[in-house]
Amino acid sequence: MADFGGVIRFTYDSNAIAVRAKFDLEPGDFSFTVEHNQDGSFDRLLQPMGPTFDVEFHDSVDGVSATSLDWNGILAGGPYNMSMIEQSTGIVHTIANGKFSGRVKIDRLKGLVTGITIQGRTGSYKQLKV
């Protein structure tokens, strides 16, 4: 029986942002789609596509106060070396030279940041067990 979940930490270039509720990972370097032909056969189409992290963050500059992070600066910056650390399982997911993308949406009643995806280049994702 495998264990999942637990405490997850995120860093970009050694700067920490607290993960709130969601961490979805797309580790693959390709997307495969299918096109069907009129004779009933099909072709598989391959599109290079780097790995992504889809994450919801806690909006706090220091993890304690209600002061927002500089999301404009974070999204405009990079590339960053990013790590998602699963403390409970000892698994570390990394994207080298990744960038933030999307449109930041902040729920100020809950301190929840959504709308952000982290994108890496093809071949930039690694998973390590520490």
Image: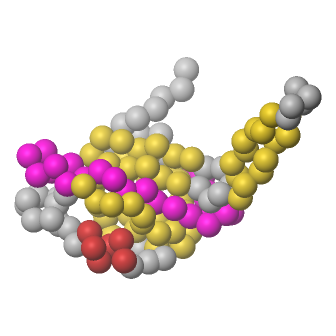
Residue found 22% across the figure and 72% down from its top: 70
Residue 39 left/right relative to 96: right
Give the number of marks. 0
Compared to 37, does 78 lie above or below? Answer: below
Task: Place residue 59 in its image quadrant.
Answer: bottom left
Q: Is residue 62 located in the magenta-colored stretch of the structure?
A: no
Residue closer to the observer: 3 or 121: 121
Residue 76 rendering spot, x and y as whole percentages: 37, 77
Residue 91 left/right relative to 10: right
Whether residue 14 is visible, yes or no, is no
Task: Place residue 50 in its image quadrant.
Answer: bottom right
Residue found 44% across the figure and 77% down from its top: 78
Residue found 37% across the figure and 56% down from its top: 116
Quadrant the N terminus occupies: top right
Task: Place residue 72 in its image quadrant.
Answer: bottom left
Q: Can you name the residue that lies furthest to the front here?
A: 38
Which SS type dominates the magenta stretch?
strand
Residue 96 rendering spot, x and y as whole percentages: 56, 69
Q: Can you name the residue that lies furthest to the top here?
A: 1
Whether residue 57 is visible, yes or no, is yes
Compared to 118, does 3 lie above or below? Answer: above
Residue found 65% across the figure and 57% down from its top: 49
Compared to 74, does 35 lie above or below? Answer: above
Residue 81 left/right relative to 111: right
Residue 95 rendering spot, x and y as whole percentages: 54, 63
- What colouring style does the render use? secondary structure
Residue closer to the observer: 77 or 102: 102
Residue 20 rendering spot, x and y as whole percentages: 27, 46
The magenta span reads 106-130
